[in-house]
Amino acid sequence: MKGGPTIPRYLFSLELAQLPQYTFDYLVIGAGIAGLFSALSFSPSQKVLVVSKQKLEDGNTYHAQGGIAAVLDEDDSADLHFADTLEAGAGLCEPEPVRALVEEGPELVKELLAYGVPFDKEDGSIALTKEGAHSRRRIWHANGDATGRAILKTLLQRAQERSNLTLWPGMFLVDLITHPQGEGGKLKISFSRGITPQPSSRRCLGGVFLNAEGELAVVWARAVILATGGAGQLYEYTTNPESATGTGLAAALRAGASLADLEFFQFHPTALYLPPAPRFLISEAVRGEGAVLRNLHGERFMAKYHELAELAPRDVVSKVIMREMKATGTSCVYLDLSALSAELIKERFPTIYHRCLRWGLDITVEMIPVAPAAHYLMGGVATDLHGRTGVGGLYAAGEAACTGVHGANRLASNSLLEGIVFGRRAALSAQRESITSEELAELRGSCQEIQGAHNITTTGLQLEIKKQLQKTMTCYVGMEREASLLAKASEILSSLLAEKRAHPSITHRWVEDEDMLTAAMALTSAAAHRRESRGAHERLDFPERDDVKWQGHIIISLDR
Ligand code: SIN
């Protein structure tokens, strides 16, 4: 299947020679756990630039609560972690990367500890918690429920101490530069039993960025690692921060990479539902410590649907909550923490406790109203075991990538782990395989002019595209999908794209809207193509899982 609007090779025609240019050995785009861990993995002799589109302490890593899963105890094993990951992934996890994840993970988490991450301890040993679908307690956490923040602060400190690393916040990716330039095209969908990035004759040599002042700059590098994170902002209700717009997915597609598993967007079962408060994450670890879900009538309902009750895989819990909300005609269910003492709540979940208190809810005495919200994109830029995307010199890691470890539904707390395991792998591959500085100098000479879809113009007209996009995705491409709704979404997204393209403007907002619309159209096409229900992807018109036809991955690339 192919069709829809054309995705250009470059957004704007630019004479790069007229712009400020910077050269590094390696460029890492994104400063979350995957980006920083990969940057720290390069040899100290290599000059590495890490850019982030907003301030450095931002993004999904910063907001991660529950923790990072890694086998530590003697009653646990890599085999058990492997089996739990595959079980949660609803038949679509790729065994090889999952093996790498569970086997390499524990050593790398110990590296985080050695870097100074203040993982919580109990009686002198690492305190482990449990989350949904884990058969053992294996979730490491820090500062109670502020694990991501603690990891990010530590990695930033270590990165700032390294003289070979440079950190530039406020660098917004416009396009990745490749040699040869190549062409754009329409979205093309294919189906593959594995995730094997399609090889491209292009080589990535860096990127064009808009800085915080809205000025263009070019960064050249011998190899690039894309670690641009999540895309929860495609939806109206999300646990993700404003910056999680899927930056990188569209740029990678334009540069010749392929995307995989985009139809699998995980909705976290328990986001705070207390309008007008934001849909703040209420960690699964709260259920791991004994909280239970109740409906409007105060009844526990999870055990009716799954033997693991509140600790069933995340896709199951979210779907059951939706069903319960429909059955009782409400917009939320309730998380009952009465089995946890007030002391435990304040000590283990200080962020959640204070955040709810700010909205007038004392969770030591009251139940928390919760509802599912967009949380994590299982799909992303298709990569092999070493972070390669198929475009020479372009690697991807973390939530921006699709390594195949999460399948159709990610196991809780496997994402920070994926960030370090595949961030490390991507950096080592990039270092091993990159072109030399001399080769870069020669190639960049022939890339000083790029031909894009638009000339640089600033119309001054800012269309309100983002809210319409989010509404469309929420109404038609949310947790429950159907052919007619998906077709409607494609139609609306295409017309939004045409509308905005009529007023090109080289600004953060315009580029971000273009990228979000591209990612949303790709996700919608993948969701329309997969005519079965599996993991996070539920089709009302194809309610069954179909392993004969659909045990594989939907790959999106450009038809050139
Ligand atoms: C949570 O704390 O519930 C989120 C953890 C995750 O998404 O892995």
Image (cartoon, rainbow, N blue to C red):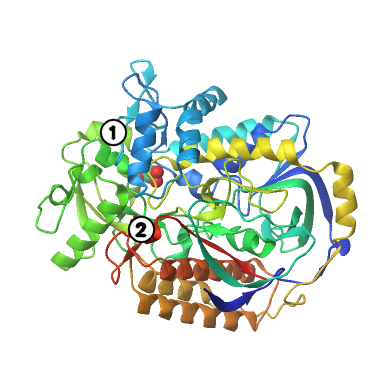
**Toward which corner of the image does residue 329 lie, by quadrant?**
bottom left
Residue 360 drawn above or below residue 541 = above
Q: Respond yes or no on whether mark 2 lies under 8 Å from ligand 1.
A: no
* In this picture, residue 19 sits left or right of residue 267: right
Residue type highlighted by circle 2: Val
Label 2 element class: helix
Q: Position of residue 215 (x, y in %)?
A: 76, 63
Q: Farthest front residue?
A: 548
Q: Which residue is drawn at 76% across and 42% down?
A: 434
Numbered tag placed on residue 548 in the rendering? 2
Front residue of 277 and 159: 159
Q: Residues within 10 Å of mark 1 (few under 14, many from 20)?
A: some
* Residue where numbered disc 1 is placed: 135
Residue 487 drawn above or below residue 14 = below
Label 1 element class: loop
> Is residue 290 shown to the viewer in this render?
yes
The C terminus, quarter of image: bottom right
Q: Residues within 10 Å of mark 2 (few under 14, many from 20)?
A: few
Q: Respond yes or no on whether mark 1 lies under 8 Å from ligand 1.
A: no
Q: Which residue is drawn at 51% across and 49% down?
A: 399
Residue 43 drawn above or below residue 269 = above
